[in-house]
């Protein structure tokens, strides 16, 4: 719900400050209406139902993948599209992929979101309402800011949302914020807000190739980005997750694996996640399973700890890089 509007209406009704906290606690536990909030006066529940919409986002449609992944499309009050994904795993993890912007202004060539028209930053309430939507049906316990947008361009609202996620059941240690390398935000994350994990979308270890794939590299070159990540690592004493999208014939060759291994030093600062490419309209092809395995073997042989991400929700365009508010 719009927390600022809630505070305004509570004040207008002469309610004590603790009412806002009571209402938030109900919402964080999965309540889906004011009527369920039995420790609020009946008259107040009725007034709030009329004056403060229970969510700042309007659900448009939801899709369910064969693997149990769910994707929800919302609209903001001013008509901006927002997509959110819930990934369900057999080990009990329920991980939310949250959006921080409607669309994205950074136009990475492989990403469907980057080809959308950029809308705006999302408010704290709009970020939290994505999580609350799924909290009403599942006990969520992990979150990644890897949906629409560049989270570090909206860092104030992202960090404010992270402050409240533990009350939904998502510990800060189970929250990751992904960035293409927005250095001012990385530097702020080293000292501000809860100690959420940092994930870097790398995708190429050569500056020239990375600039082709990710135009933001012209503004924040890779050596400077990696240096900022190391400063974050030293301040927070946690590994940086590095995301590397595997693109056939683009960044999956033997010599590129060697180059990547050379870039990720010291080894203790990084954990590498190789990501199979999920189809979009961008014209790329994903590296095959054997090519990914060979690439990983080169990295492991040089001491780079790496995993291959399990793809979730591809059949409903809910996988990494596929969010585009159209399915």
Image (cartoon, rainbow, N blue to C red):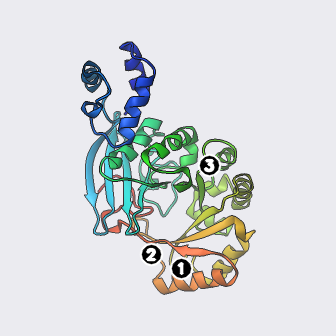
Tell which circle, 1 or 3, labels the residue nearer the N-terminal end: 3
Do the residues under discs 2 and 1 have CB atoms within 8 angstroms? Answer: yes
Q: CA distance from mark 1 to mark 3?
A: 37 Å
Tell which of 188 and 282 is nearer to you: 188
- Residue 325 is situated, as x and y percent measured from the top left of the image, at 34, 52
Residue marked by disc 2: 285
Q: Is residue 43 above or below residue 138?
A: above
Q: CA distance from mark 2 to mark 3?
A: 36 Å
Q: Nearer the viewer, mark 2 or mark 3?
A: 3
Disc 3 crowd, CA 10 A, few/some/many (<14, 14-19, 20+): many
Tell which circle, 2 or 1, labels the residue nearer the N-terminal end: 1
Residue marked by disc 1: 249
- Residue 4 is situated, as x and y percent measured from the top left of the image, at 44, 26
* Residue 2 at least partly seen: no
Residue marked by disc 3: 195
Q: Secondary structure at mark 2?
A: loop
| Image side of residue 299 versus residue 316, left or right | right
| Image side of residue 310 versus residue 203, left or right | left
What residue sits 53% from the left and 84% below the top?
293
- Residue 212 is situated, as x and y percent measured from the top left of the image, at 59, 64
What residue sits 29% from the left and 65% below the top?
65
Q: Residue 230 falls in which quadrant of the image?
A: bottom right
Q: Secondary structure at mark 3?
A: loop
């Amino acid at each position: 719900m719009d927390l600022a509007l809630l505070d305004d209406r509570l004040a207008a009704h002469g309610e004590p400050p603790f009412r806002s906290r009571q209402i938030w606690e109900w919402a964080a536990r999965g309540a889906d209406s004011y009527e369920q909030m039995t420790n609020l006066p009946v008259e107040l529940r009725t007034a709030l139902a009329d004056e403060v919409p229970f969510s700042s986002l309007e659900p448009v449609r939801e899709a369910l993948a064969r693997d149990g992944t769910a994707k929800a499309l919302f609209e903001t009050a001013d008509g901006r599209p927002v997509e959110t994904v819930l990934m369900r795993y057999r080990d009990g993890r329920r991980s939310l992929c949250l959006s921080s912007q409607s669309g994205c202004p950074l136009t990475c060539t492989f990403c469907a979101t980057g080809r959308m028209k950029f809308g705006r930053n999302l408010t704290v309430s709009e970020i939290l309402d994505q999580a609350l939507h799924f909290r009403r049906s599942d006990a969520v316990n992990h979150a990644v800011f890897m949906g629409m947008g560049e989270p570090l361009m909206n860092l104030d609202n992202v960090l404010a949302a992270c402050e409240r996620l533990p009350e939904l059941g998502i510990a800060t240690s189970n929250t990751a914020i992904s960035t293409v390398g927005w250095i001012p935000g990385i530097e702020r994350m080293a000292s501000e807000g809860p100690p959420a994990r940092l994930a870097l979308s790398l995708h190429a270890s050569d500056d020239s190739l990375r600039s082709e794939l990710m135009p933001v590299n012209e503004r924040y070159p890779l050596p400077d980005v990696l240096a900022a990540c190391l400063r974050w690592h030293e301040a927070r004493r946690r590994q940086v997750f590095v995301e590397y999208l595997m693109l056939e014939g683009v960044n999956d060759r033997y010599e590129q694996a060697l180059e990547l291994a050379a870039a990720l030093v010291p080894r203790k600062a990084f954990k590498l996640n190789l990501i199979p490419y999920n189809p979009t309209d961008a014209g790329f092809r994903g590296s095959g399973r054997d090519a990914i395995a060979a690439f990983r073997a080169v990295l492991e042989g040089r001491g780079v700890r790496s995993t291959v991400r399990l793809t979730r929700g591809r059949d409903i365009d809910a996988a990494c890089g596929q969010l585009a508010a159209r399915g």
